[in-house]
Image (cartoon, rainbow, N blue to C red):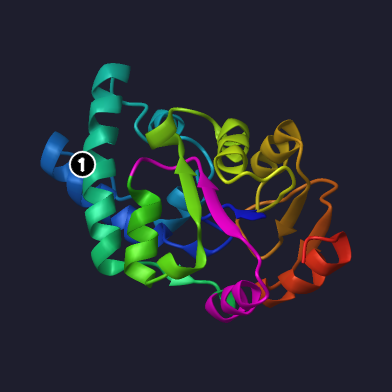
C-alpha cells in the first residue's frame, strides 16, 4: 500500500485556505488578518490547533481554538468549491498506478472533512481506497498510518510526504518514507526522493512497492 500526505505532496491549496481563513476570521472575530499563501504553507503538516497557535497567538487559547473550528468548517466548503492546484502529473500517475493494482490511501493532519473536500473538488475519489485525518480520528499521523493499514488488512506500506514531520511519523509507524522534494519542506535521509510526481512509480519499483 502507498499512503500519501496531502498538502505539499498531492496539491497546493494554500491560496484557497488563506482566502477562506481571512474571510471567516473577519466574520467571526472582526479582524483583518491578511494571511498569505506563504503563511499557510509554512504551517502545512501541523494539526489545526498548532496552526492556530502560530497564526492566532493574539487570541486567548479558548477563543483561538473556537475561531479555528469555525475556519475549518468554512475552509472545507470553500475548498470544495474553489479547489487548489494539483501538482503536475498527479492524476496521470495515480491512474497508472491504479491500473497496476497499487492500493492507495491518504493520511493527513488536517481537520475532519478536508480530505473529502480535496477528493470532491479535484474529482479524485476513484484513486483512493481509504483516508484518515487528525480531525476525524483524534490521532496523530503515525497512529493514523497504522490505522489505515490495519483497516485495510495491510502489513506493509510506504508513505509519501514532503516535510520532516512526515518522515518522523512514518518512522514511528514502521514504514519507509519517500520525500516529495517539490513540496513545502525538507526530509533527512528518506528512503527515496522524487523531484516531480511522475517519478514516483520508478521509486516504488526500486523499493519493491510496485
Please state if 96 lies on the left or on the right of 17 as rendered. right
When the figure is inspected, residue 30 is found, relative to residue 114, above or below; the finding is above
The answer to whether residue 51 of the structure is visible from this angle is no
Query: Residue at 51% across / 38% down in the picture?
Result: 46
Query: Which residue, given by chain and number where applicable, does mark 1 sit on?
Result: 25
Q: Is residue 42 above or below residue 88?
A: above
Asked if the stretch drawn in magenta spans residue 110, the answer is yes
Residue occupying image coordinates x 37% and y 27%: 57
- Residue 191 location (% of width, % of height): 84, 52
Q: How many marks?
A: 1
Secondary structure at numbered mark 1:
helix
Q: Tell me the quarter of the image containing the N terminus.
A: bottom right
- Residue 170 vs residue 131, the one in the foreground: 131
**Mark 1 residue crowding within 10 angstroms, few (<14) / some (14–19) / many (20+):** some
Apparent side of residue 99 relative to residue 118 in the rendered image (left or right): right
- Residue 73 point in image, percent of width and height: 23, 44
Towards the viewer: 3 or 32: 3
Task: Return the residue nearer the eye: 27 or 69.
Answer: 69
**Image coordinates for residue 55, horizontal then vertical, percent:** 39, 36
Could you tell me which quadrant the C terminus lies in? bottom right
| Residue at 15% in and 34% down | 29
Residue at 41% across, 65% down: 125
Image vertical order of residue 169 relative to residue 4, above or below:
above
Instruction: Find residue 172 and report its image quarter.
Output: top right
Residue 190 higher or lower than 87, as above or below: above
Asked whether residue 101 is drawn in magenta, I would say: yes
Residue 70 in sight in this render: yes
In the image, the segment drawn in magenta is 91-112
Amino acid at each position: 500500500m502507498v499512503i500519501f500526505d496531502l498538502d505539499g505532496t498531492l496539491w497546493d491549496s494554500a491560496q484557497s485556505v488563506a482566502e477562506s481563513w481571512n474571510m471567516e476570521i473577519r466574520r467571526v472575530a472582526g479582524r483583518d488578518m491578511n494571511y498569505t499563501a506563504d503563511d499557510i504553507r509554512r504551517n502545512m503538516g501541523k494539526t489545526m490547533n498548532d496552526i492556530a497557535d502560530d497564526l492566532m497567538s493574539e487570541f486567548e487559547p479558548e477563543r483561538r481554538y473556537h475561531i479555528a473550528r469555525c475556519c475549518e468548517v468554512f475552509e472545507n466548503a470553500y475548498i470544495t468549491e474553489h479547489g487548489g492546484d494539483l501538482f503536475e502529473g498527479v492524476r496521470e500517475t495515480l491512474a497508472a498506478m491504479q491500473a497496476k493494482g497499487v492500493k492507495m490511501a491518504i493520511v493527513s493532519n488536517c481537520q475532519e472533512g478536508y480530505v473529502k473536500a480535496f477528493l470532491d473538488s479535484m474529482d479524485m475519489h476513484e484513486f483512493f481506497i481509504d483516508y484518515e485525518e487528525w480531525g476525524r480520528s483524534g490521532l496523530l499521523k503515525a497512529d493514523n498510518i497504522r490505522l489505515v493499514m490495519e483497516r485495510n488488512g495491510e502489513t506493509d506500506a510506504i508513505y509519501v510526504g514532503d516535510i520532516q514531520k512526515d518522515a518522523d511519523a512514518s518512522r514511528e509507524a514502521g514504514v519507509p518514507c519517500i520525500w516529495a522534494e517539490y513540496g513545502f519542506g525538507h526530509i533527512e535521509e528518506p528512503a527515496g526522493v522524487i523531484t516531480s510526481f511522475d517519478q514516483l512509480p520508478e521509486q516504488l519499483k526500486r523499493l519493491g512497492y510496485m
